[in-house]
Amino acid sequence: MESFLEPAVMIIEAINQGLEHAALQLEIIPPPGKKGHLRWFSHATQSTMSADVESGGDEIKPGNPAFSKMLEQKLADFLARKSEYLDVWANSRGLTKEQLEKMQTQDEFDGDREKAPFNHHTPRNRKQLYLLLYMQHMLYTAGISVLQLCKFSDDIIAAGIMSKSGPIIPPLITLVKWFSAIFDTADATLPDDERPRTMKEQTLLFGIAGKVTRNIEHLPPRNAYERLGVCINRFQQFLRGPEFSFGFRSACATMSCAILAYLHQTQEIFTHYRLIWSVIISAIGANMSAGQSGLSDVLRILGSFAALIICYAVWYIPNGHVAGVIVIMWLASFFQMYFLIRWPKYIIGWLVILITEVLSIGYELQVKKIGKVNAESTGIYVFPPYYVAALRVACVLWGTCASIFFTYLPYPITARGLLRKDMAVVIQPLANYHAVVHSTIKVRLLGKEGDVSEKHSHGYRMARTRKAMFNKIMTLSVSINHNVYLQKYEPSLGGRFPVAIFKDIISQLTNLLDLISLLSYSTQVWEVSGVTKYCFAHSPENAMWLSDLSKLIEPINPIEEGITSILCQLSAAVSTGRALPPHMRTKTPYRLSERLRTLDPEILHLDHMLEPGYSAHAVMEIISSMVTYKIDRLVSTVEDLVGVISFNFGQGGEEGQGKTE
């Protein structure tokens, strides 16, 4: 492995410098030598010491117009010497060239030592070989992506875009999409630039079980009357959404405090004692889930009592003198800003403290300025400072209690319920994402992807699909992690919430998303066109690679469809809480090496080392095996959560009670 360390460090340093070059060109970081320049890249420290990017003589540093060409040359050298690095590794392991070639034609994940043709270290050496191929391939493809970013930044500079200044106005189509998002009733909306433009594209992006599910209670409309009924149903579904339910709860909480202002007997009390504060608190204190409401309510209550103490200190330390009050008030606000910046997640509490201080102290300063008679002309009684601050705290407590009451009645909307719902929703797009990635790989191998920069090509539409699915999953993941944080602030009725199991499922879903994305990214070398077509050494031998691999695609379909089917079943199980069927496991990973050797014994020869398909095939085998392993772990974890259907009563396998022992 040491033979690979030096070239790996070299290419990583080049990648870091490429990121620094793009950041300098796009003015994300200030130029070297200017005040505020941050050294973002540890390996690029020496390149940022000079204020002039060309002052280093012949050395080309980030920010130099010729840097992209230098980075491209380094990547070409790394690719050309790839076989040399593997030869050094083979010599360090005591392997001859014939043994290395023989080892590459075997399955890298076969751990049966009895089949080892050389010695008992062969399985380990074979895994190390594929690991080296994996690392080389991913480093090179990462370098290609950074190179494309550097070229993009150079084009931006050459076009003079960075020298212009002015407001950035979104195009009209983006504004229309923003407006349409208001009426989007899907589980989770897409980013604005990823909404399907046509029904055909929507079907491609989401399939049958995607964004718009089938209405099993109604057949498709056949006439104008039925189409009108569909529109009415959509409007009713819009009114039936959780937003309107939340709005009704908030209105009830607000009116429970504001009702005093509409009754003749209590109108003057509402005005004299500033009870409008409780109405405001009940309105802004309403939250969708009980967990979020619990956290914000605790912060408001604690913040109100802290503000009460601070108000007393601010007013009575200078004994009510205006100049002293202003100075102490500024000093208190100055120190409070530290806590606001240091712990921003508790911003609700810090804002309650600041607002209470400003209202209470500011009102007393106003009375001193305009006099008591003018202050009471609006119908508000003038109270001493200690009474005003305490009244403010009482109003906050009243409004908070009203908000809490209508959060839990008639029934609470818990963060735990939202967590389970979001987790079930995110597994479904992950299944679609897995399917579209494998479809992309098939299209690439068959050479039908076309020019990915052409909007009507298969490659462009599939790239758009992958990006839309990935963005949707990432958006849902943020909501899931937030609900995991909020659920600990909810009171538990009954047994404990299985937070450890949910966290384990989230971790495994994240790993699966990373692996599937990596699978799509690593097979970009099979693109015959697109932005990276000039970065890979395509040759007639590579066409042979793609031709042989394409013959193996159809037998992979059952495995790929099986994984998609398992993910869909897991989504339904998490959503409904129903037990899973027994023996739901993935099939044995598809052995590409063994199949390739059957088609062509020379296909894995060392002479093909520089072909892009050579390393990509190793990466694909490794990632596919890891995906299969992660799916099995995910199934096992979900089985622990929802149980397995079993009628072996004597073995503890009742439905929904857990896995059979």
Image: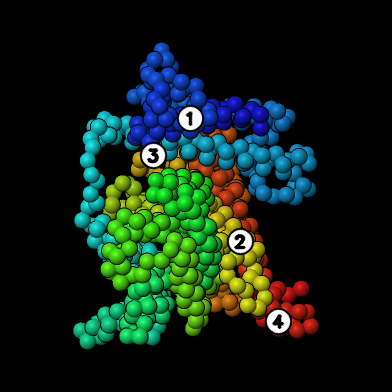
Label 2 and label 1: CA atoms lie apart by 35 Å
* Amino acid residing under circle 4: Glu
State which tag comes first along the sequence, 2 or 3: 2
- Cβ–Cβ under 8 Å for marks 1 and 4: no
Residue depicted at 67% across the width and 75% down the height:
495
State which tag comes first along the sequence, 2 or 1: 1
For disc 1, the neighbor class at 10 Å (few under 14, some 14 to 19, many from 20) is some
Q: Which quadrant of the figure contains the N terminus?
A: top right
Instruction: Name the residue tied to disc 4.
Output: 654
Label 1 and label 4: CA atoms lie apart by 60 Å
Label 3 and label 4: CA atoms lie apart by 55 Å
For disc 2, the neighbor class at 10 Å (few under 14, some 14 to 19, many from 20) is some
Residue depicted at 74% across the width and 82% down the height:
648
Is residue 143 visible in the rendered image? The answer is: yes
* Amino acid residing under circle 1: Arg
Instruction: Name the residue tied to disc 2.
Output: 503
State which tag comes first along the sequence, 3 or 1: 1
Residue 638 drawn at (x, y percent): 62, 68
* Amino acid residing under circle 3: Thr
Residue depicted at 66% across the width and 72% down the height:
496
Disc number lying in front (3 or 1)? 1
Residue 151 drawn at (x, y percent): 35, 33
Disc number lying in front (2 or 1)? 1
| Above or below 77: residue 376 | below
